[in-house]
Image (spheres, rainbow, N blue to C red):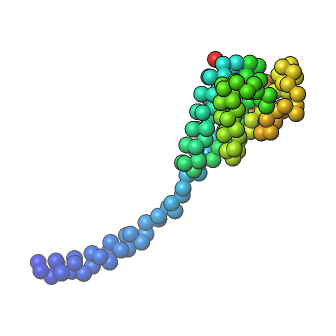
Amino acid sequence: MKLRTIATMVFLPMFCTAQISQIDLAPVVEKAVKTQNVVFDCSSADKKYVASRLRLIDMSIKEYVANGTPYNVVVTIHSGCTDIVSKKIADDDKMMKNVYKKLEIVSKHENVSIEACQIAVDRFGIEHNELHPFISLVPNSITRVISLQNDGYAFIPFSK
């Protein structure tokens, strides 16, 4: 009996090692983080609402950055929201100044494009030299949003 115990103690580690060495260990593969693509579509004339949505966009981008999540953000501006693209703001218009400040904050993030609809800008009589420097013009916000959605961008409207 003692001989069997001694033999087991001597040979067992060799068998275990042989078994372990034959196991195919798959390499550890890190899962790639998918780029988050989103278009925020602003058509609202309610400036308080627009300011609140711009704040949420800023917070969302900060969350992506903190988590190391790659992202692309497009903000499209048209319809009742169009006047926010103009630098012409009355000195006493605190709400428009607040909207401008929030737009500027969002514009400073990487991978963000703020785009105004050329049709709406022209309809509202906003001169191109009046646009905030971080605003780019697109020929038509509708076709731009369609294109972005077809490219897999999530659609988030501000239409209150």
Q: Which quadrant would the C terminus be assigned to in this image?
A: top right
Q: Quadrant of residue 55?
A: top right
Placement of 19 over or under 135, stated as above or below: below
Which quarter shows the N terminus? bottom left
Does the rendering let one see residue 54? yes
Is the residue 133 above or below the residue 149 in the image?
below
- Seen in the picture, residue 6 relative to 72 is either above or below; the reply is below
The answer to which image quadrant residue 137 occupies is top right
Whole-percent x and y of residue 36?
A: 63, 41
- Towards the viewer: 18 or 119: 119
Q: Position of residue 63 (x, y in %)?
A: 55, 43
In terms of depth relative to the viewer, which is nearer, 144 or 90?
90
Q: Quadrant of residue 56?
A: top right
Q: Identify the residue at image location x=61%, y=38%.
A: 58
Q: Residue furthest left?
A: 1
Count of marks overlaid on the render: 0
Q: Residue at x 77, y 29 (%)?
A: 85
| Residue 96 x/y as whole percent | 69, 26
From the viewer's side, name the closer residue of 45 and 101.
Answer: 101
Residue at 71 percent of width and 36 percent of height: 74
Q: Residue at x 88, y 33 (%)?
A: 129
Of 75 and 25, which appears nearest the observer? Answer: 75
Relative horizontal placement of residue 97, taking residue 133 as reference (left or right): left
Q: Residue furthest front?
A: 92
**Quick check: can you spot residue 153?**
no
Vertical arrangement, residue 17 with respect to residue 95, above or below: below
The spot of residue 148 in percent (x, y) is: 74, 33
